[in-house]
Image: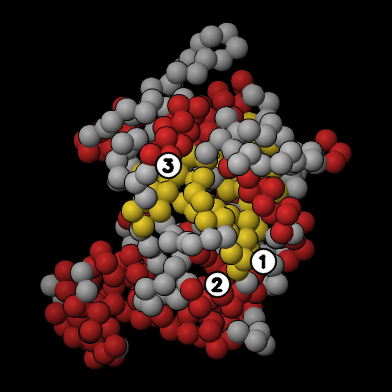
Amino acid sequence: MTPAPIASAAGGEPLVSIVLPAYNAEAHISSAVGSVLAQSIPDWELLVIDDGSTDATLKLAEWEAERDRRVQVHRMNRNSGVSAARNRAFEMARGRWIAILDSDDLMAPDRLERLVTLGERYGADMVSDNIVEFTCPDSPLHKFFKLHGDLTIDAEHYLRHTMFFHGSLHYGLLKPLFRAEAVRRTAQRYDERLRLAEDDDFYLRLLLEGLTLRVCASPFYFYRQHRDASTQQITAKDVSALAEASDRLLADFTSHPLRALLIQRYRAFQRASNYLRLVESLRSKDIMGAISIAARWPSSLPLLRTPIQTMLNRVLGRVEEPAEDAELRGLLHETLRLAGEPAEACSPADTDNPLQLRPIDRKNDQGNEPAL
């Protein structure tokens, strides 16, 4: 069903600001930008934040900005991480809604229109959709969430269904649109000390402030899995940082009615960190270190019966639901086509060199390709 027409933002400001941090993303950034250019609503601005890239990312982004004034490129003084890049973009965003897009992902052509319509209909502060993971145009597709219908999420629902090691959903993987006014009213920002699950921490903080999240069961966001994806390499240090962030949540919301769930969340992160420390000690043949960890944290021992990748998926809360259907496959191919990326089959070897997947094919006003 085609969404109803959306009223433009007042005062000449864009309806949606899309925030796109990028670091050494030359392989896919043109496709990500292309999926924004193909959106069914024209009333947007795209804020590309180059986080100190050392490859052709900045040149590619600037070339896109030259051909469409809605695309803006800003460069961080140094590599500061995705949280710092998003915080900077949030400060500059002029839209009524703020969307986030990773530099290797894609949005279906009517995603923004559908989500803004949904958010306005329900008066939501945040609105998101399901996510589909893909590697190549014709690789297996998986939905991140097994949802049976749209739902509204508050802080309690989020905490109960995003509890690590409980085999639950992990709403921190969502890529919502934020109502800019509501977010700024809370003064909450991404935690720049986190390199993993910074989204989860930010969303939960907003929900604890009283904001609500509306989730659409249908997927319009395409998450590209490849060798360099940041969520593939997770260490005990990373999860320990999540435990520290969870401890900061407890300090910031000392009298919150959901404090018991926040404590449970903190302990789950601690357990995950200890498990990974134990695994790392065993892999490095540090037997004495492993014995020390096991003696101090015996609850980590039963987890060794679970394969490491399965356990990491639990740490991340990933729930992959097979999603092979002709309509979804067709939507991916159409999204790739409109983004300028050929919907061709690729081999595993190609994913190690993703530049082979998408030659630059959009021309600037003079009909030239960017010089890299």
Q: Earlier in the sequence, mark 1 or mark 2?
A: 2
- 81, 323: nearer the viewer: 323
Image coordinates of residue 323 in percent, x first then y, are 37, 50
Task: Tell me the tag on residue 212.
Answer: 1
Q: Amino acid at mark 1?
A: Thr
Q: Is residue 121 left or right of residue 207?
A: right
Query: Residue 27: image x %, image y %?
Result: 39, 33
Residue 299 falls in which quadrant of the image?
Answer: bottom left
In the rendered image, the residue lying farthest to the front is 1
The quadrant of the image that shows the C terminus is top left
Quarter of the picture holding the N terminus:
top right
Which residue is painted at 59% across and 64% down in the image?
Answer: 151
Q: Residue at x 65, y 74 (%)?
A: 208
Q: Nearer the viewer, mark 1 or mark 3?
A: 3
Instruction: Give percent across and percent down for residue 361.
Output: 45, 18
Instruction: Check disc 2 and give the amino acid type.
Output: Tyr
Q: Residues within 10 Å of mark 2 (few under 14, many from 20)?
A: many
**Of callouts 1 and 3, the N-terminal one:** 1
Which residue corresponds to mark 2?
Answer: 158
Q: Looking at the picture, tell me which residue is in the foreground, 91 or 223.
A: 223
- Distance of mark 1 from mark 2, alpha carbons? 10 Å
